[in-house]
Every structure is written in C-alpha cells, then in structure tokens.
Image (tube, rainbow, N blue to C red):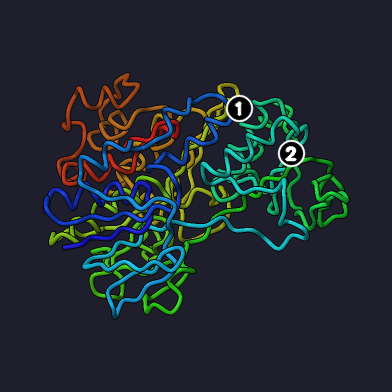
C-alpha cells in the first residue's frame, strides 16, 4: 500500500501518526513544497521579532520522518491529479502513483489587485521563505506599510515595530482585527497601537505600489489619494484554499475542497485535510473553510486513520482566535463580532466591561446555546466558553452570569440551587470541587468529549502544541 501525502505541515504530521498506528508496513511518501521539515507557521512573526529562536520553529525534525519510515520529496509541489490513473503530477512533470492520497496542500496568500504589486520589496507573510526574505530586507527598510489589519497583519506589524521599523497599517474595513473584534474592542485595539507608535489607516485601501526607476518601492498610494512613503510592503489580507493544482481533476470544489465526515473527497481513496478543505462548521451548521491549526491537526488525524482502514468521523469545528500584540490580548470564537445592543431576534449579547482593569468580556447566545465570545486581556475563561460551544448544551440556567465577576461553579450553584456563591476564582477551583457544582444533566456534555475540547482550546498562540 502506498500512501501519498501532498503538503508538509500539521495535517500531514497528524496523518502520518494515524496511519502508522494502523499500518506499520505501508509506504508513505510526503510531497513537500519547501526544502524543510514541518514547522510552526504561527511562530514566524515571533522569530522575526527576535522573540523565538530558529531552533524552536520546526514542528517535527527530520528524525520524525525517519522513525516513521516516511520518504519526503523536498522542493516538490503538487501540480496536478490524474485520479483515473491513480497518480499525481509533481513539479517538473514527475508523476507518482498512489493507492491512497491525502491533499494537505494548505492555502495561498490572497494578493488584491494593486498596481505594481509584483516585484521586489512586496511580500506576503505566511511562510518561512517570506519571513527570511523580509528579514534580509530589514537593513534597508525604515518604513513599511502592512496591508491588512487581520491576525497576520497585526502580528507582522508588531514584529517589524520590535525591529525598529516605522509601521503603517492600512485596512479596507473600519476596524482592527475586523473578523474578530466588535466596535468597542476595536477602539481598545486602536488605543494600543497609538500608544506604541504604530500608525494605521482604516476604511481605505492600497491601489498602487509606487516604484523608482530601478523598481525599488518608494511608497504606496491609497484609494483616497493619500501617499504613504515606505521601502517595503507586506500584503496580509488573508489566504485562500490552494485549489489551483486540482483543476480538472474531478474533485468537488467550492471555495475549498469538499469532504465528507471521513475527510474523503468526491473521489474514492482521495482525502483532504487542513486549510485546503471546506469542513463542517458547528456554529453555522454548514461547510466552509476554517483555517485553524488545531482543526487541521484533527482533520489530518481522522483522514490518516481512515486512509489506513479506520472508521473515524469528523464532527466539525468552529473558528477560534487567540492573539497578543503590544501587550493587548484577544481570545475569541464563533460569532464574536455581533454588536451589543443591535436589534437581532436570533441573538442575545451580554457584555462585561472594566476599562480600569482593561477587561472586556462578551458572549453571544442563540437559542440558549453559546454561539460566540470575545475576551480582551483577561482570557482565562476562553477554554470554558469553548467547551460550552463544543457541547452545544442548553445554558439557560446560568447564561445571565456568563460574563459576570463570578466563576462558572458559582454561577451554576447560584442558578441551580439558589445557594450563596463561593469565592472561586478560576477553573482550578472547579476541578478541585468536582462536577457536583454542575447539575447532573450537564456533566455528560463535558465528560463525553474531553479530548475534542482539549484539541481546539489551545489559546497560547506562541506554542505549537496540540
């Protein structure tokens, strides 16, 4: 049996581990588009900032592949798929046969239509190659424009600021972290940038990169006509599933590769996992791309198991975000941008705000189930909230206390039994006292899926562990 895995990141690692649990003799071949082992992509901005050494970047060392009996074809990428012949086409036209195939080819940076965007001095920032190219330019850069105020843009801006570069962020929408923050929390984020001396422009976009006669970047022009001088541009407006190599292959594709709950595509014996797929969103009840490290691992694990004859099922996931920049911490999940006070029959929005302590908590409830949350600076409840989303339990008993200054055990004790609250401060107290604080009917929702909750509730973005 030959297992071929296209791509070499976290989903690939998980798939290898799952295959080897069931098949210790089959041949595994990994097609790696980069000349390096799997590494932790969320850490590349920390490395650029000088906070994480290079030796911490690899997610798996070469010894992992050797120990698992895996052959890696470095500097090769998937260029095409010939399913009727059971083979893939690689860089340079090389063809490789497979019995089972996993498409873990990730996502590609989206480059908007900007005049003269192609050329030196303009980079996306999603890979080690991008990071090394930017690092090599820093000696010549005094000013940089970062296009996009999402997760990648904010973290890259922070890293460049730490290296002494003047940074200006340009965001098309009117908020910092627009797919995560609401109006109030975005205002807090703007204050953080202003205090640090990082400039930003909201509600505008870059329409042209201006270059001198030698082709070097000298600035950007915005839609409003504003000119911002700079020597480098980082384009960080998001990524798209890397479906181009699958054109004409017969694999069903929407925005990403469509898979069933076994992570199998529309083609028999062809599976997919990670940022390239559209999988089930537990909150929206529909399939869509969710580009998230822990979910990619889970999908790779399930795909690998099923490739080797297992019977695993993917129950779905939901977007979880955790980011810290310039001392400002954000944790969110699900429908975090629903605005408080907006008339919307489908949702209830509850907010706790303490500007003195810099604490902001918001939960979004729909049909007595937690649909999303947003935490600023104090992110200690992120795991508990995520567990409530995962369990899909009815929280009507204690929903009014979710954002208050009482712990979950206190809230349940007070709501369920009308007893005086105890002075619990964290989930440690909850674990110590045991499940007696929850009504019995609620306990099963957590105890039935502890591993699932653990896999998705990793809120330390600096650490790549599952």
x, y percentage for residue 158?
62, 32
Q: Is mark 2 on a helix, strand or loop?
A: strand
Mark 1, other Cα within 10 Å: few <14 / some 14–19 / many ≥20? some
Which disc is residue 259 wearing? Answer: none
Residue 96: tell me if it is visible: yes
Which residue: 19% across, 39% down?
Answer: 439
Up the image or down, 269 lies above or below 399; here it is below
Figure disc tally: 2
x, y percentage for residue 111?
64, 58
Question: Which numbered disc flags the more N-terminal residue, 2 or 1?
Answer: 2
Q: In this view, does 178 lie to the left or right of 450?
A: right
Q: Relative to the observer, which residue lies in front, 252 or 181?
A: 252
Up the image or down, 254 lies above or below 119; here it is below
Residue 181: tell me if it is visible: no
x, y percentage for residue 438?
21, 36
Q: In this view, does 327 lie to the left or right of 379?
A: right
Which residue: 53% across, 28% down?
Answer: 359
Disc 2 target residue: 144
Q: In this view, does 83 lie to the left or right of 91?
A: left
Q: What element carries label 1?
A: loop
Instruction: Compute the Cα span from label 2 to label 1.
Output: 17 Å
> Picture quarter containing residue 282?
bottom left
Where the C terminus falls, by quadrant?
A: top left
Q: Relative to the observer, which residue lies in front, 223 or 409?
A: 223
Which disc is residue 326 wearing? Answer: 1
Q: Which of marks 2 and 1 is in front?
A: 2
Which residue: 23% across, 55% down?
Answer: 28
Mark 2, other Cα within 10 Å: few <14 / some 14–19 / many ≥20? many
Where the N terminus falls, by quadrant?
A: bottom left
Up the image or down, 461 lies above or below 30; here it is above
């Amino acid at each position: 049996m030959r297992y071929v895995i296209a791509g070499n990141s976290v989903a690939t690692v998980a798939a290898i581990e799952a295959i080897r649990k069931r098949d210790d003799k089959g041949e595994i071949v990994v097609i790696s588009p980069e000349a390096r082992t799997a590494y932790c992509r969320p850490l590349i901005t920390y490395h650029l900032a000088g906070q994480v050494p290079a030796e911490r970047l690899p997610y798996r060392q070469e010894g992992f592949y050797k120990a698992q009996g895996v052959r890696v074809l470095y500097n090769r990428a998937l260029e095409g798929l010939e399913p009727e012949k059971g083979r893939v086409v690689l860089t340079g036209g090389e063809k490789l046969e497979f019995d089972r195939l996993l498409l873990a080819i990730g996502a590609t940076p989206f480059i908007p239509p900007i005049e003269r965007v192609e050329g030196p001095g303009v980079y996306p920032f999603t890979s080690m190659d991008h990071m090394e190219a930017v690092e090599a330019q820093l000696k010549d850069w005094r000013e940089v424009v970062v296009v996009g105020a999402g997760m990648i843009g904010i973290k890259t801006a922070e890293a460049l600021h730490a290296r002494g570069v003047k940074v200006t962020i340009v965001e098309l929408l009117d908020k910092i972290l627009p797919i995560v923050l609401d109006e109030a929390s975005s205002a807090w984020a703007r204050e953080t940038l202003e205090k640090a001396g990082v400039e930003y422009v909201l509600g505008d976009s870059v329409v042209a990169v201006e270059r001198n006669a030698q082709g070097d970047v000298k600035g950007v022009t915005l839609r409003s006509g504003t000119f911002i001088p700079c020597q480098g541009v980082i384009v960080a407006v998001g990524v798209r599933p890397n479906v181009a190599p699958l054109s004409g292959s017969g694999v069903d594709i929407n925005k990403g590769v469509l898979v069933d709950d076994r992570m199998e595509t529309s083609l028999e014996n062809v599976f997919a996992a990670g940022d390239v797929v559209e999988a089930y969103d537990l909150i929206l009840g529909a399939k869509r791309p969710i580009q998230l490290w822990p979910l990619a691992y889970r999908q790779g694990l399930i795909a690998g198991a099923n490739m080797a004859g297992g019977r695993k099922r993917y129950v779905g996931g939901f977007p979880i975000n955790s980011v810290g920049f310039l001392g400002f911490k954000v944790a969110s999940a699900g429908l975090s941008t629903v605005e408080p006070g907006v008339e919307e029959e489908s949702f209830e929005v509850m907010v706790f705000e303490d500007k003195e302590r810099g604490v902001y908590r918001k939960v979004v409830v729909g049909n007595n189930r937690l649909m999303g949350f947003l935490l600023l600076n104090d992110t200690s409840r992120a795991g508990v909230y995520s567990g409530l989303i995962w369990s899909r339990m009815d929280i009507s008993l204690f929903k009014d206390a979710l954002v208050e200054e009482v712990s979950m055990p206190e809230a349940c004790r007070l709501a369920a039994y009308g007893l005086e609250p105890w002075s619990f401060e964290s989930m440690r107290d909850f674990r110590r006292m045991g499940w007696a604080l929850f009504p019995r009917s609620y306990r099963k929702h957590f105890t039935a899926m502890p591993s699932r909750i653990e896999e998705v509730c990793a809120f330390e973005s600096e650490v790549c562990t599952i």
